[in-house]
Image (cartoon, helix red, strand yellow):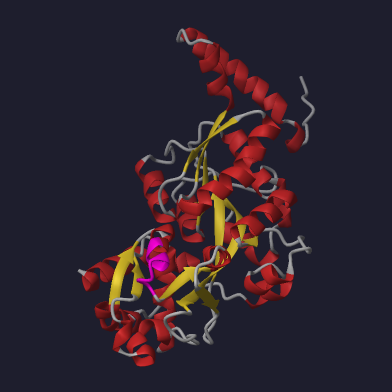
Amino acid sequence: MTKTKQPHRTSISRRKVLKYSGGIAACVAAGAGPASIARAADTLVVNSQGGEYKEIFERVVIAPFEEKFGVKVIHDATGTASQDMAKLRAAGGKPGFDVAASLTPPEVILGGREGLLAPMTAKEVPNLDHVWDEAKGLGAGYGAVHTVQYASLIYNKEKVERPDSWADYWQPWKRYGEGIRNHVIGFNPANLLSIFALLYAARLDGGGTDNMAPAWDYLEKQKPYLGVVVTGSSEAVPHFENGQVWISPYWSGRAALYIDRGLPFEMVVPKEGVFGLPDVAAVPSGASNKDLAFEFVNFRLSKDVQRAFSLAYHAGPGRSDITDFPEEFLSRQIASKEKIAKTIWPDLAKIGEKRKDWTLKWQEIMS
């Protein structure tokens, strides 16, 4: 019998009915009641970030998705992107969540190569067609770029004068004197922010992904001036708020968010430039609710959700066709064709390959 293929966006109810029927059979056999059957059929587990991201993500993305599709989303707001990758590896692609909503390209590239992530095309996620042309390849065929940020330099304007170079972070004593000691923050390489900062250091003396020697020299000399070292970006916020940290690399979205909330900081694009960071959503190869997971990623890329999340989180969108952002937002974020064209994209595949070795070197210096 020949079956007529229905469009992906309108076939969700059919898939849910089929999955629901299968869930009923399995649950009845196990002696489960109606509540268990509903959870088995209509629950999606989504992993993302904690901190201020969690509240915004739940309000702007998860709650509208639950209402539209009549499902329950369990939000697993734990782990950095690299820690999520470790979970994927340890579980062989079955980490216990259906959507990895906050990966970066290095994890997606490696996850795809290792069979830990499900292939993702416009067939599964039609809104992929609207992603920035410059960012489409960054999902490596296994993920959807839904947010674009950059690693800016931020400083406490009540404590120090405006920096203009990445050297002001890596050699702060030269710009600010000994008073800056214990007021500089470092990040563990489990956070890609640390990797980007190290690459900025390497580039100051002609290095890069193929020559990180300058970065290690800068790290050794900066170490006595560090007052705190953290892993997650949200862990840095209390140290900004209590006045301990005066200068730091920081993601442009979080930086603008906290500045608008009253943090006495300003953000800078140093004269050497900045690297763009795409945030990527992917579906584990062993996800238990894969069809609904793809629906979630597609919803994450819908125009209204993209605009609402970008304004709430202060981060550039993954879509290229949103043209009505406020001028202040456009001045800070990568949200126009002109800015996306000027963005420097590091060799993310090479970062994925070398990150472990760089982390070991960082640990050796910092121990």
Q: Nearer the viewer, residue 94 or 147?
A: 147
- Identify which residue is drawn at 54% across, 43% down: 283
Judge by depth and name the residue closer to the eye, 243 or 316.
Answer: 243
Q: Residue furthest left?
A: 367
Q: How many labels does the image show?
A: 0
| Residue 366 at x, y percent in the picture | 24, 71
Q: Which residue does the image show at 42% across and 39% down from the upper left? A: 95
On screen, residue 120 versus residue 111, left or right, reads right
> Is 148 situated left or right of 363 in this image?
right
Which quadrant is home to the N terminus?
Answer: top right
Q: Tell me, yes or no, if residue 335 can be seen here.
A: yes
Residue 129, quarter of picture: bottom right
Magenta residues, as a range? 238-245
Residue 171 appears in view: no
Which quadrant of the figure has residue 312? bottom right
Query: Is residue 122 found inside the magenta-colored segment of the image?
Result: no
* Rendered view: 234 above or below 298: below
Determine the image quadrant of residue 327: bottom right
Estimate the x, y position of residue 267 in percent, counting from the top left: 53, 75
Give x and y (percent) for residue 190: 36, 60
Q: Does the magenta stretch include residue 239?
A: yes
Q: Is residue 312 left or right of residue 336?
A: left
Indicate whether 123 appears above or below 242: above
Residue 101 is situated, as x and y percent measured from the top left of the image, at 53, 48
